[in-house]
Image: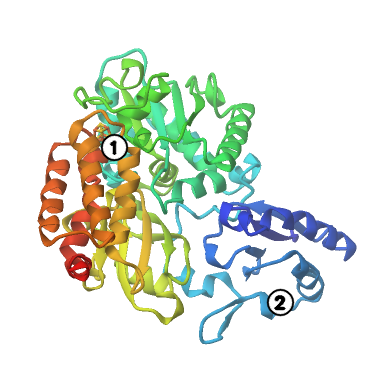
Amino acid sequence: SNRRRLLVCGGLTCGAAGSFSLPEIFQEAIKKAGLEEQVTVTLVGCLGLCEEGPLALVMPEGILYCRLKPEDVPAVVEEHLKGGKPVERLLFRDEAGKVYPLLSEIPFYRKQQRVVLERCGYINPEDIAEYIAAGGYRALTSVLFSLSPEEVIEEIKKSGLRGRGGAGFPTGKKWEAARRVPSSKRYVICNADEGDPGAFMDRALLEGDPHAVIEGMIICGYAIGSDEGYVYVRAEYPLAVKRLRIAIEQAYAAGLLGENILGSGFTFHLHINEGAGAFVCGESTALMASIEGNRGIPRIKVPRSTEKGLFGKPTVLNNVETFANVPLIILRGSQWFANIGTKGSKGTKIFALSGKVKHTGLVEVPMGTTLKELIFDIGGGIKGGKRFKALQIGGPSGGCIPEDMLDLPIDYESLTGAGAMMGSGSVVVMDEDNCMVNTARFFLSFTERESCGKCTPCREGTKQMLNILERITRGEGSPSDLSLLEFLGQVVKATSFCGLGTSAPNPVLTTLRFFRSEYLQHVMEKR
Ligand code: SF4
């Protein structure tokens, strides 16, 4: 139709800044202006440029409004929607004062490649019809009626898709392993227990495009021969849980979930399991224990979950973003996907950019993009004319990367080689005012608090490391504390039972490696 669409960002950041009330206010003003027949107002998922929220996008022109307040609504309606002239004072403006009316022209978006986030911010996440109209569930239909489960697995393998939750395990291989184990029952789990400080990628996807994740899970179910799945989502994400619940209900009502999907003979049921806020439940075996109704603590990973996972049955557990990639690969082909990214890391990656960077928000870039491009070209550099000092990538399990390593490409291997890790995709930027010892202490205090206590190195080691760090930041440390900290970090890393413990020392070890002078400064100041 010729109707214009006014898309108000309903992501949590814009919502917190007041966007949830805007659609109603817009609707009233539109009615008053007699434009009801010409403009539709929709609350959508995260548009990405969180720093400038509340955001609203006028389609089809693609004009983006920033920092919208209820009192700005009459001007947008009268001057733009009625008068045809965008309200300049509400458009994006860079530091030099240049105005960018079009979203697609804003440097923050121009260097991105939004494929997984393609629909996020453009469709109503609470209306399955909009997802379908945008090409949704077409991949599922083609899988059910024209591909065998083996062919689906082959396509995912050929694409080179690797797990977006952090470890980067090849997705197709995981699916194949689960399918090969003889069993009358298999499970699909989506890990949406995003707990890293600074991470909001999975939340944004679930809030903005929940059906993409559901579709990916159903396709996985078909490929591995499973009729049941769980989305393990943290209860601290009420909006994501709400939209997911609505999406699942609508998918059932449309015959896309449940018995005999679309008459294909394939059955798949999907449940939501709300986590109770333990970081360790993001670890696959702890997550499964939690779904089973037990205490969420990790177990030894032999046998693998693909052999004996949830309720002792073969299980595929993938992250939200991994599943959201699946329909795209099926629709556009493994070759299309494999052409994006680097040799070992294919496709795109979504990052949550926060901290001292000018344009915080939700970003999607092809693998291989450098950290410098991410922070300076997309993020716009450092706020307030300050100097970049470091970035923390991968949350409390990741590492701090200094300025001279900003040319590092974003791929699994490069980041691990630098002592950091991709993790799920949180990037916290620090400037010259940040103390790196305090930063390390912050992240370690998080993992120390979240340690489940099952094994001694993590339970006691993180505690001792934190004691030393606190001693140093109080000005009571000594130079020998640095080597002790390093030694303890290596021991905790080498001997802890699960990934939480083996990666917990990373922020300390990388800051000791790259910012040792700051530790020494603390120690010397005292003397
Ligand atoms: Fe628990 Fe930490 Fe040991 Fe993991 S490493 S089992 S979180 S105590």
Q: Quadrant of ligand 1?
A: top left
Compare residues 37 and 242 and report the one nearer the observer.
242
Using residue 177 as the reference point, say whether residue 120 is left or right of it. right
The disc placed on residue 490 is none
Residue at x 45% of width, y 55% of height: 115
Q: Secondary structure at mark 1?
A: helix
In the rendered structure, which amino acid carries the disc numbered 1? Gly
Q: Residue furthest top?
A: 184
Q: Residue at x 27, y 15 (%)?
A: 182
Q: Along the polypeptide, which appears first: circle 1 or circle 2?
A: 2
- Which residue is most to the front? 527
Measured from the top left, where is residue 193 in percent x and y?
42, 38
Foreground of the two, 470 or 192:
470
**Cβ–Cβ below 8 Å for labels 1 and 2?**
no
Task: Point out the image quarter for the N terminus.
Answer: bottom right
Q: Where is mark 1, residue-wise?
A: 172
Q: Nearer the viewer, residue 126 or 142?
A: 126
Between disc 1 and disc 2, the foreground one is 2
Left or right, 173 with reference to 271: left
Q: Dot 1 surroundings within 10 Å: few (below 14), some, or many (20 or more)?
A: many
**Residue that label 2 marks:** 86
Q: How is this picture coloured? A: rainbow
Q: CA distance from mark 1 to mark 2?
A: 47 Å
